[in-house]
Amino acid sequence: MLPQGPFAYSTYEKWKFDEPGRGVHSDARRLRDRYVKVMIDLHCHLLPGVDDGAPDLAAALAMARIAVADSIEIVACTPHIYPGMYDNDGPTIRRAVAELRVRLEEADIPLRLTLGADTHIAPDLVAGLRAGWVPTLGDSRYFLLEPPHHVAPPRLAETVFELLTAGYVPVITHPERLSWIEDCYGTFVELARQGAWLQVTAGSLTGRFGKTAQYWGERLLDEGWVHILATDAHGVDRRPPLLAEGRRVAERWLGAGEASHLVVIRPQGILNNVDPERLPAPPALSVDIHSKRRGSWLRRLFGRG
Ligand SMILES: [Fe+2]
């Protein structure tokens, strides 16, 4: 059954999902590799004047033009939600996205917007998600979860467990750029096994964030733990919304098919709120789908395996 929703578009309809858990149809896979060139960026600080991203409308429009030129068709506006520093919330982000849509149309920039947030870990996240104060990606079950950059949070695994059992899929942002990843690489692998998704920043793979981030980004990618790539763009110069360069690196490491999964197919599935079990798993989690199902502690816990 083809996932339907507000973000279905023509290239996507050239292939379809097979039976649940069995991956994509082989003919569809060939078509996907040939046709799916436009991309979806689900992590971008495009909204003007709400965080450390685009400082004003002119910068936001310039970023949008860069994204379109890079073959990005849809962008999720994901400003920081960091209580005390960036006090954004669902209703204000939603209004700002609607306003920016109008400005893009006036400027004749063909970029489609949806909403989200770059959500820092907080003790009441599940309540915030349920109440709508923390927006998910395109109002789906998926949302961006940003761990602190310099200190490993003491309850990361418990937080992810609470979110998963509440029905949300946390997409953990740019683990490769965290200063503590060397000590906790295995933690992210385990979280991915348990059902969290991992987002690597495209620029990490091209060295925009230094050699260390590039190493960990490539390692996560090469070992098959990455679900999506995104730009995490903050402006036009230092951190522009460029996704194709990351896709090209992924093509070299994993092939064109998995590279499409990273920038088109899984992001599309997120926006259409497709059950993660019905989307193509990253290579490390798709070796044996039957043992994977038995291995999921959530499925064991709820007897759905
Ligand atoms: Fe971000």
Image (cartoon, helix red, strand yellow):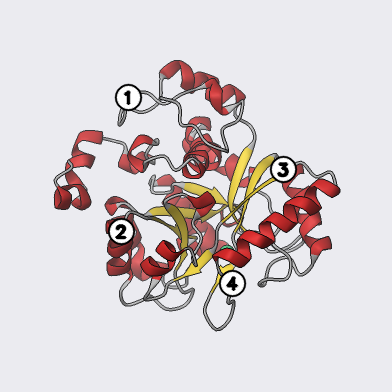
SS of the residue under disc 4: loop
- If you read the primary sequence from the N terminus, does the residue marked by circle 4 or circle 3 appear first? 3
| Mark pair 1, 3: CA separation | 33 Å
Q: In which quarter of the image is residue 304?
A: top left
Question: Mark 1: which amino acid?
Answer: Glu
SS of the residue under disc 1: loop
Residue drawn at x 49%, y 56% is 136
- If you read the primary sequence from the N terminus, does the residue marked by circle 3 or circle 2 appear first? 3
Q: Residues within 10 Å of mark 1 (few under 14, many from 20)?
A: few
Pointers 4 and 3 in contact (C-beta within 8 Å): no
Residue drawn at x 56%, y 69% is 89
- On-image quarter of the N terminus: top left
- Where does residue 80 sit, x and y in percent of width and height? 57, 69
Q: Name the residue tied to disc 1.
A: 19
| Mark pair 2, 4: CA separation | 23 Å
- If you read the primary sequence from the N terminus, does the residue marked by circle 1 or circle 2 appear first? 1
- Where does residue 47 sit, x and y in percent of width and height? 69, 62
Q: Is 245 in front, or is 136?
A: 136
- If you read the primary sequence from the N terminus, does the residue marked by circle 4 or circle 1 appear first? 1
Question: Mark 4: which amino acid?
Answer: Asn
Taking 133 as reference, is 295 left or right?
left
Q: Name the residue tied to disc 4.
A: 88
Pointers 1 and 2 in contact (C-beta within 8 Å): no
Q: Name the residue tied to disc 2.
A: 166
Pointers 1 and 3 in contact (C-beta within 8 Å): no
- Where does residue 236 sit, x and y in percent of width and height? 77, 60
Question: Mark 3: which amino acid?
Answer: Asp
Q: Name the residue tied to disc 3.
A: 70
| Mark pair 3, 2: CA separation | 36 Å
